[in-house]
Image: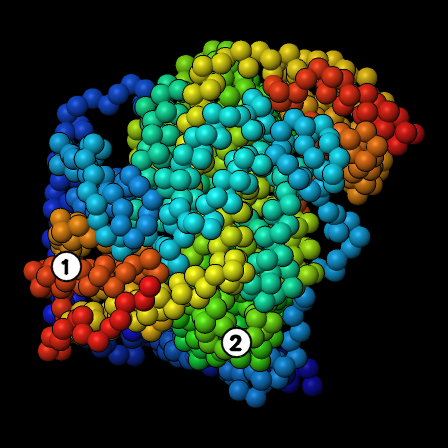
């Protein structure tokens, strides 16, 4: 059997090879047709046939109307907001008077450390008079965006005043404090640009960074070594340095920790690596420096070296709104491409005139700054030995930040502990203190704590009272 | 809807094309001169703030007509105001204020109920609250910035709008852009009208949810988009959506149209989507008692999940609010960043809104509120019908106080604006990028403080200017006496 198979295969092979090895059968157009050319021609034909056949795809069947109806009926949405839990029902204390150093809460007079009224301008006579004049002349609102008859002469006066005070060529006013920074950043940073930001920046800056769609790299909070490493890394990886804009975003006084940014070091790094600086001076304008001109004055850096400075006016200047200042090019660019400026109504004129009066006051009375500094130093001293809490802010920062020495374990219990300290301080000792609240959208990971905003109009007895109360309550609660 | 005739479209395109060509020519010379003159040393190594193409529109088109925008005023934005004159000595590149002002009729400010200037009921109370609470609380709402006024206003707004609870914010723009990320995130779907305001677009983008757009004011297209999206699910994974929110506005500020609210609510209910209504321009201005589009179109406020509005337009103040059910407002007070981090609304501004709402509701003891509401409705309808009779192409629905007049050609924009200003009527002209490129328009905002004579004067001026420029695209009706048969409302 096997032999017969072998014989048959041998004879087939002989027959096949005789064909292939046969001498030239014909000459077509001068090309001799050998046997193997037939096989190659067949191969080519088979290949072409396979290529021209459509590959198998399962047929596409779009959903029928009935199926879509069924899917729509089956779909169940989540509730719009999650279930309300116990800690969501927090009711803040309601003030019944102005938010000065002494305020009235629930009929009782309390010492107020929860308002960022650094220069004590809340309730100032001159500012109130200028507001009353503006209210009688212009009404309350400005009824229009800046491009459509919402520009009132007080806005232009205020912009010039701030620019002159700081020593920059020009400035631009925004109608709300937090909208300033999250409109400025997307106006200058677009997709493809590089931003190096501090990881402790507050929510408005984070939102601006997200909306700008640029590449964002975070460095460790207030750590210059980490900043230098990140700058080095980013510069090495950058492909088109001429077309890509690069920014460093920092705050002068961080409201999440009370630290102060070392501006001279940052300017040195910026010049070495060719970055631009965006500096948010919300809590340092009117506070730092010999004349209150902010961080540049305090560190002795010429103001031209900082490209963009933004600040909210809801703190030292005791009014509302914000401004941004820099070179003429920087400011003009924002008038058409900053969304919070173009698409929103302008600042109410009485708040702009309050800002002008506040800057005038600061220029005429620079002694209020030394009073503020003395108050901060006194409070800092007194609070250095509170049981269970440790000071985490800079010694010159008007935001005195106390964090827990040892965390209780989870974030939630920490918050509860701090809330109970603040509650007891308010109810038993009539001292109003704020705890940091973090929104679920906030990506900042710095520890939470208690914040005291020191004002130049606090008297020494107020400071001592607050320190004594904190020491007493903390000893009770954290034990 | 806008019907653009062919000849107008061709001439507009031609004009823009010409401007573009000239702009490119000038840019070429600018580049040439830039090579010849050496760059300043400080800027070496830094990328420019704006690369050449990014601000082409600003440098070559906008700067030519810059004097039509951003005109400063020197008095309250009431029905008549003082416009500051500006001069330029470098061909409109920079403008400088002069000391001169001219008294003009105000057809541009958002002053629907006439609360813009000092008011006899509101202003004394505002000054009182200023002396009591000072201009700012310097603090956020959760720390030390909540005053009795804020609590009172939240209750009043909730009562006025017809919802259970409300929350206040200091700025209308921030209300939208900080709120939408709170209620929806990744895995959710936002379906918004194609002509929604920039604050809504920013809020939607900042939330991380997928955004889809439906044709302006077309409930049938909305239904199509909803069906398709629910059936498809999330992009790429096809998992079902976590939630769907549909965002519409009450009155669209560039069209003057009212939203087709009853149909849209019906569609959303059928497909279990949540609705968000932005009443920035319609609250206080439309409806029999000023309660907005819900009242005007007969929609129950309980059917809309979240109602948002601003106080800038009809109440003469600043800030915004959200009105919804108690649970939603409780959650927002706990997690909305604008509530936790932003300075609370200035107390005098809060008092202004409280007084304005009391006037509108008639709780101040007079009938001024009802008079104002009737007057703005009469004024808007009268003005719109007269303009249409003259042959202008006017957009918008009846009862809406916003009326855009179509201009189309880029050269007519500054011509209309400057000519009207010369005759002491101040109008607002809007072009690209706030509107589509070919559809430039002049937008008129009527106020309850305009008297019949003011409107007649405005109509005369606009008619004359319209004839001069050639914007009467439709045939005019034969002229009638405008004073005939209308009595003045006091």
- Residue B104: assigned label: none
In the foreground, A375 or A197: A375
Relative to B444, A443 lies left or right: right
Relative to B66, B270 lies left or right: right
Badge 1 marks a residue whose secondary structure is helix
**Quadrant of image for the N terminus of chain B:** bottom left
Circle 2: is it few (<14), some (14-19), or many (20+) Cα within 10 Å?
Answer: some
Return the chain for callout 1. B
**Quadrant of image for the C terminus of chain B:** bottom left
Give above or below for B265 relative to A403: below
Badge 2 marks a residue whose secondary structure is loop
Q: Position of residue A170 (x, y in %)?
A: 33, 27
Return the chain for callout 2. B
Badge nearest the viewer, 1 or 2: 1
Q: Residue at x 64, y 45 (%)?
A: B148
- Residue B299: assigned label: 2
For the residues beneath circles 1 and 2, the answer to whether they share a chain is yes
Q: Position of residue A430 (x, y in %)?
A: 78, 31
In the foreground, B345 or A123: A123
- Residue B461: assigned label: 1
Quadrant in the rendering for residue B323 = bottom right
Residue B79 in view of the camera:
yes
Residue B3 in view of the camera:
no
**Distance (Cα) linking label 1 and label 2:** 39 Å
């Amino acid at each position: 059997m096997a032999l017969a198979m072998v014989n048959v295969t041998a004879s087939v092979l002989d027959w096949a090879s005789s064909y292939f090895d046969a001498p030239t059968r014909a000459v077509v157009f001068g090309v001799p047709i050998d046997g193997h050319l037939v096989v190659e021609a067949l191969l080519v034909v088979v290949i072409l046939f396979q290529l021209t056949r459509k590959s198998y795809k399962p047929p596409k069947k779009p959903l029928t109307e009935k199926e879509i109806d069924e899917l729509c009926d089956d779909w169940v949405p989540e509730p719009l907001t999650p279930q309300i839990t116990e800690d969501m029902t927090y009711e803040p204390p309601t003030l019944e008077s102005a938010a000065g150093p002494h305020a009235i809460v629930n009929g009782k007079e309390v010492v107020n450390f929860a308002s960022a009224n650094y220069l004590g301008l809340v309730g100032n006579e001159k500012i109130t008079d200028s507001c009353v004049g503006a209210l009688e002349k212009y009404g309350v609102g400005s009824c229009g965006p800046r491009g459509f008859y919402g520009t009132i002469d007080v806005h232009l006066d205020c912009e010039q005043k701030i620019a002159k005070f700081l020593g920059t060529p020009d400035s631009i006013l925004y109608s709300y404090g937090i909208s300033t920074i999250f409109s400025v950043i997307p106006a200058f940073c677009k997709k493809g640009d590089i931003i190096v930001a501090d990881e402790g920046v507050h929510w408005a800056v984070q939102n601006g960074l997200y909306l700008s769609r640029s590449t964002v790299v975070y460095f460790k909070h207030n750590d210059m070594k980490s900043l230098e490493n990140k700058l080095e890394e980013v510069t090495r990886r950058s492909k088109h340095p001429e077309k890509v804009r690069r920014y460093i975003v920092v705050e002068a006084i961080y409201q999440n920790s009370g630290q102060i940014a070392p501006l001279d070091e940052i300017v040195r790094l910026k010049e070495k690596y060719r970055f631009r600086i965006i500096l948010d001076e919300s809590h340092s304008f009117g506070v730092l420096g010999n004349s209150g001109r902010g961080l540049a004055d305090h560190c002795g850096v010429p103001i031209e070296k900082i490209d963009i400075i933004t600040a909210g006016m809801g703190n030292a200047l005791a009014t509302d709104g914000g401004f941004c200042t820099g070179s003429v090019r920087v400011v003009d660019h924002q008038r058409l491409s900053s969304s919070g400026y173009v698409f929103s109504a302008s600042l109410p004129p009485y708040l702009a005139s309050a800002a002008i009066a506040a800057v005038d006051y600061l220029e005429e009375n620079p002694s209020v700054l030394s009073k503020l500094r003395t108050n901060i130093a006194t409070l800092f001293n007194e609070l250095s030995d509170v049981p269970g809490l440790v000071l985490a802010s800079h010694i010159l920062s008007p935001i005195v930040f106390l964090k827990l020495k040892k965390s209780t374990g989870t974030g939630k219990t920490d918050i509860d502990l701090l809330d109970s300290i603040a509650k007891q301080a308010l109810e038993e000792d009539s001292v109003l203190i704020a705890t940091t609240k973090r929104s679920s959208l906030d990506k900042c990971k710095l520890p939470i704590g208690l914040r005291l905003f020191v004002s130049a109009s606090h008297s020494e007895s107020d400071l001592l009272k607050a320190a004594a109360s904190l020491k007493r309550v903390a000893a009770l609660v954290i034990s | 809807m806008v019907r653009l005739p062919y000849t107008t479209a061709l001439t507009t395109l031609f004009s823009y094309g010409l401007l573009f060509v000239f702009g490119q020519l000038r840019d070429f010379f600018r580049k040439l001169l830039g090579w010849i003159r050496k760059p300043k040393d400080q800027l070496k190594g830094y990328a420019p703030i704006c690369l050449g193409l990014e601000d082409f529109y600003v440098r070559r088109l906008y700067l030519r007509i810059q004097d039509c925008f951003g005109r400063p005023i020197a008095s309250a934005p009431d029905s008549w105001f003082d416009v500051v004159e500006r001069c330029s000595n470098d061909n409109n590149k920079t403008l400088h204020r002069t000391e001169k002002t001219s008294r003009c009729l105000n057809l541009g400010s958002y002053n629907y109920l006439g609360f813009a200037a000092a008011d006899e009921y509101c202003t004394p109370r505002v000054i009182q609250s200023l002396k009591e609470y000072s201009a700012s609380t310097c603090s956020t709402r959760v720390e030390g910035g909540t005053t009795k006024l804020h609590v009172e206003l939240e209750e009043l707004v909730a009562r006025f709008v017809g919802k259970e609870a409300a929350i206040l914010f200091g700025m209308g723009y921030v209300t939208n852009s900080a709120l939408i990320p709170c209620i929806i995130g990744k895995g959710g779907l936002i379906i918004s009208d194609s002509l929604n305001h920039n604050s809504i677009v920013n809020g939607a983008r900042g939330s991380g949810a997928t955004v889809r757009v439906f044709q302006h004011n077309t409930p049938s297209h909305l239904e199509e988009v909803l069906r398709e999206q629910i059936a498809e699910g999330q992009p790429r994974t096809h998992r079902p959506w976590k939630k769907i929110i549909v965002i519409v506005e009450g009155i669209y500020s560039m069209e003057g149209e009212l939203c087709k609210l009853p149909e849209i609510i019906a569609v959303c209910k059928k497909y279990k989507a949540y609705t968000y209504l932005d009443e920035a321009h319609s609250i206080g201005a439309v409806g029999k008692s000023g309660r907005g589009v819900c009242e005007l179109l007969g929609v129950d406020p309980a059917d809309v999940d979240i109602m948002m509005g601003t106080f800038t337009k009809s109440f003469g103040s600043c800030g915004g609010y959200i009105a919804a059910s108690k649970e939603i407002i409780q959650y927002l007070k706990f997690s909305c960043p604008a509530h936790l981090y932003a300075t609370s609304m200035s107390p005098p501004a809060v008092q202004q809104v409280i007084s304005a709402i009391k006037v509108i509701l008639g709780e101040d003891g007079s009938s001024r509120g009802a008079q104002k509401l009737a007057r703005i409705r009469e004024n808007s309808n009268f003005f719109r019908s007269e303009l249409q009779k003259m042959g202008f192409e006017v957009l918008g629905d009846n009862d809406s106080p916003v009326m855009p007049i179509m201009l189309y050609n880029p050269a007519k924009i500054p011509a209309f604006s400057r000519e009207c200003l010369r005759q002491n009527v101040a109008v607002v002209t809007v072009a690209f990028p706030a509107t589509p490129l070919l559809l430039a328009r002049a937008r008129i905002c009527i106020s309850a403080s305009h008297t019949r004579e003011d409107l007649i004067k405005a109509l005369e001026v606009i008619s004359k200017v319209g004839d001069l420029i050639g914007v009467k695209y439709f045939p005019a009706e034969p002229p009638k006496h405008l004073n005939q048969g209308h009595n003045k409302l006091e």
